[in-house]
Image (spheres, rainbow, N blue to C red):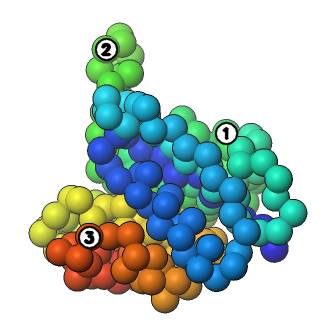
């Protein structure tokens, strides 16, 4: 069994760390994984995305349009932008909290996050919307959004991993002073 997963957001949201947590969890379970990510724009507040392909027989890290089983959107507009990659009955886990990408700020385009969420509701059969503001209030930090979204993705059943797999990856990849907060974040959406 293979899974194609795309993570997308805006630089600074923890998209790259989340993709590395999934990759570490997969490797710990001896699940073959291929990844590709954009990291240059992360430092500039631009669009960031990662392709993750889990399972045997995967030779390329890039996911073709219409082939993603799961899109984890850290930002609603970025989830809409990458929606063409989602397969017909795929799942989208998306944060409700908008973060306007630099590309929208410098262009003449309008950015309406409520319209983005509405578009996802109309076009995605399997949609999980995570209330990022509530998570931040409950957990005391927006910096755990990446792990909150991974918890919601676990709940969707599309990650091909278990809670224990992700807990171990968090233990390995997150600095000690943030471990307990990230454990709570993983539980929050479940």
Q: Residues within 10 Å of mark 1 (few under 14, many from 20)?
A: some
Q: What mark, if any, has residue 175 been given in the picture?
A: 3
What is the residue that sits farthest to the bottom in this orientation? 164
Visible residue check, residue 153: yes
Observer-nearest residue: 190 or 183? 183
Q: Residues within 10 Å of mark 2 (few under 14, many from 20)?
A: few
What is the residue that sits farthest to the top in this orientation? 108
Q: Secondary structure at mark 1?
A: helix
Visible residue check, residue 133: no
Circle 2 or circle 1, nearest the eye: 2
Q: Secondary structure at mark 2?
A: helix
Quick check: marks 2 and 1 in contact, CB under 8 Å?
A: no
Whole-percent x, y for residue 129 in the image: 42, 61
Q: Which residue is mark 2?
A: 106
The residues tagged by marks 2 and 3 sit, at their Cα atoms, a distance apart of: 35 Å
Q: Quadrant of the C terminus?
A: bottom left
Whole-percent x, y for residue 160 in the image: 65, 76
Quick check: marks 1 and 3 in contact, CB under 8 Å?
A: no
- N-terminal-most mark, 2 or 1: 1
Query: What's the residue at 58%, 40% (across, down)?
Result: 82
Q: Secondary structure at mark 3?
A: loop
Q: Is residue 60 left or right of residue 17?
A: right
Query: What's the residue at 69%, 79% (across, down)?
Result: 30
The residues tagged by marks 1 and 3 sit, at their Cα atoms, a distance apart of: 35 Å
Q: Residues within 10 Å of mark 3 (few under 14, many from 20)?
A: few
The image shows a total of numbered marks equal to 3
Whole-percent x, y for residue 56 in the image: 82, 68
Q: Which residue is mark 1?
A: 84
Circle 2 or circle 3, nearest the eye: 3
Q: What mark, if any, has residue 144 been given in the picture?
A: none
């Amino acid at each position: 069994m293979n899974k194609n997963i795309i993570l997308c957001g805006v630089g600074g949201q923890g998209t790259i760390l989340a993709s590395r947590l999934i990759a570490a969890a997969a490797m710990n379970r001896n699940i073959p994984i291929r990844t590709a990510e954009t990291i240059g724009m992360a430092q500039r507040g631009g669009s960031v995305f990662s392709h993750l392909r889990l399972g045997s027989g995967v030779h390329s890290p890039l996911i073709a349009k219409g082939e993603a089983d799961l899109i984890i959107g850290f930002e609603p507009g970025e989830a809409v932008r990458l929606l063409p990659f989602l397969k017909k009955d795929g799942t989208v886990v998306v944060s409700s909290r908008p973060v306007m990408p630099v590309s929208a700020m410098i262009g003449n385009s309008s950015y309406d996050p409520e319209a983005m969420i509405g578009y996802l509701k109309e076009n995605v059969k399997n949609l999980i919307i995570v209330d990022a503001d509530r998570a931040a209030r409950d957990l005391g930090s927006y910096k755990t959004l990446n792990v909150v979204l991974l918890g919601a993705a676990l709940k969707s059943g599309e990650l091909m991993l278990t809670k224990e797999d992700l807990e171990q990856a968090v233990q390995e990849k997150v600095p000690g002073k943030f471990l307990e907060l990230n454990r709570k974040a993983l539980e929050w959406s479940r």
